[in-house]
Amino acid sequence: MLLELEELDASKIDTLNKLLAGKQAVSRAYNKRVKNKSFEEGEIVWKAVLPLGTHVAGCGKWSPTWEGPFIINQILGMRAYRL
């Protein structure tokens, strides 16, 4: 019985390793398309209107999804900017 328990633990570890490898593969495939972008002070940027999916009354599906342009005045760190 002890040997069967040891084999069971080994199979659980193998399954966990396969699961983690699959998640890493999905992560790599997704992150290939992600492009990091950083901005500097004085750049002109557009700001997304949040939350997504909300609409301005009277505009319906033609509601704007962006506001701006804005100028970056200060870099706050952790990809946060003061406009």
Image (spheres, rainbow, N blue to C red):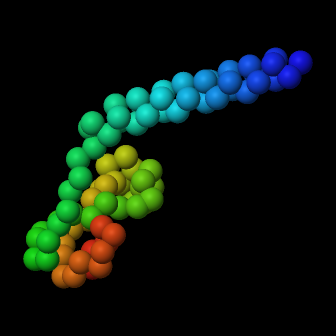
Position above or below: 21 against 56: above
Task: Write down the quadrant of residue 29 in the picture.
Answer: top left
| Outermost residue to the bottom | 73
The residue drawn where x is 29% and y is 79% is 76
Q: Is residue 64 left or right of residue 20?
A: left
| Outermost residue to the front | 3
Q: Is residue 66 left or right of residue 17?
A: left
* Image coordinates for residue 2, horizontal then vertical, percent: 86, 22
The residue drawn where x is 40% and y is 36% is 27
Q: Nearer the viewer, residue 35 or 54?
A: 35
Task: Write down the quadrant of residue 59 in the picture.
Answer: bottom left
The residue drawn where x is 35% and y is 61% is 49
Indicate the quadrant containing the C terminus: top left, top right, bottom left or bottom right.
bottom left
* Image coordinates for residue 12, horizontal then vertical, percent: 69, 26
The residue drawn where x is 76% and y is 24% is 6
Position above or below: 68 against 15: below
Is residue 83 visible in the rendered image? The answer is no
Position above or below: 3 against 59: above
* Image coordinates for residue 54, horizontal then vertical, percent: 45, 55
Indicate the quadrant containing the N terminus: top left, top right, bottom left or bottom right.
top right
| Outermost residue to the right | 1
Q: Nearer the viewer, residue 37 or 64?
A: 37
* Image coordinates for residue 77, horizontal then vertical, percent: 30, 74
Q: Is residue 34 left or right of residue 61?
A: left
